[in-house]
Amino acid sequence: MFDAQRQGRLSFYMVSAGEEALSVGSASILDKQDVIFCQYREQGVFAQRGFTLNDFMNQLFANKLDPGRGRNMPVHYGSRELNIHTVSSPLATQIPQAAGAAYGLKMQRINDPSLPPRVVAVYFGEGAASEGDFHAALNMAATRSCPVVFICRNNGYAISTPTLEQYRGDGIASRGIGYGIDTIRVDGNDIWAVREVTKKAREMALQNGGKPILVEAMSYRVSHHSTSDDSFAYRARVEVEDWKRRDNPISRLRKYMEAKGFWNEAKEKEARESIRRDVLKAFSQAEREKKPPIRSMFEDVYEELTPELKAQMRELRDHLEKYPDEYDVGEYEGGKSSLDL
């Protein structure tokens, strides 16, 4: 998908290379009913919980099958069925939202003890932890004893700013301790360590009616921040290649599985070929789908279209009819006829 953006077939993309163990390892131990708030590198969380390749592609291409109806930037996934809130662009906004959601779950159980115990898990980078929302969220969660697991991906860089220029303290973990929150730091490139820590964090978050836990997972962003970034402008290429070679989470897991006899070169080749084939198939299908109806830009604000919105729709339809050669409405479901009232 990064390459597709470079080809002009996608407007924007953000990869999660080097952080796969962190997202998959933590998501694999969370209950399906637990509520999740992601940032933008948690493709592994979505995939582990059942988000399909078609789901990814439909959102990226903003076609008519995208549940968000094409209204979000690419990589802003979400799924009501999987209990994952839609990714939001503003940095750190999901952290206080997660604390509030966890407080809501706690109050629901107080009112109805028969409800199953649930936690909220929220993902963010160490750069987001420099935002005020991070501190407000931790303080609220601590004082209200909210069952929320804060999962910080400390990948070394906040866009172009290295951690040495972000803070002078001992990472993010010390901040949790300062707020009276039980905290642990873990090797974020070790899927088994992340899984074990998340399992314990979830158990602790549900104790005595609920309490927050902070997990700082140490990792490294081997990719550019996004397709709008050239990370070699602020870090050496040799640094990235060194991390890829010695501490890549996928390579580490592969070596472990090969040592246990679970994996070999033939299985690796077969997996890579089949996954690539499936990705390209979903890519091709999503790219060919039409965009949502033009009228959808006026919908979902009010239960029924207001007179003002109806007037705007008529104006848009008249404009498209007046200048038919200026706009390609054929790529939208229903074309300009979708503006009929």
Image (cartoon, rainbow, N blue to C red):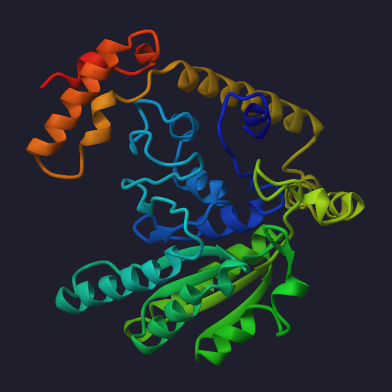
Image spot of residue 54 (x, y percent): 46, 29
Query: Looking at the image, can residue 283 be seen?
Result: yes
The residue most toward the right is 238
Q: Quadrant of the N terminus?
A: top right
Q: Quadrant of residue 106?
A: bottom left
Q: Quadrant of the C terminus?
A: top left
Position of residue 268 in the picture relative to residue 14 (left or right): right
Relative to 164, say whether 91 is above or below: above
The answer, for residue 156, to whether it is visible in the render is no
- Of 35 and 270, nearer the camera is 35
Q: Residue at x 18, y 70 (%)?
A: 114
x, y percent for residue 234: 81, 56
- Viewed as shown, does residue 303 lie left or right of 72? left
Residue sitting at the far front: 322
Instruction: Name the residue rendered at 44%, 51% in the picture.
Output: 87
Image quadrant assignment for residue 219: bottom right
Q: Residue 196's image quarter?
A: bottom right
Query: Between residues 146 and 134, which one lies in front from this camera angle?
Result: 134
At x 33%, y 9%, the residue is: 324
Q: Nearer the viewer, residue 40 or 244?
A: 40
Q: Position of residue 279 (x, y in %)?
A: 58, 26
Vertical arrangement, residue 101 with respect to residue 27, above or below: below
Image position, residue 294 (x, y; %):
28, 24
Total marks drawn?
Answer: 0
Q: What residue lies at 72% left-to-right and 43% top-to-bottom?
A: 262
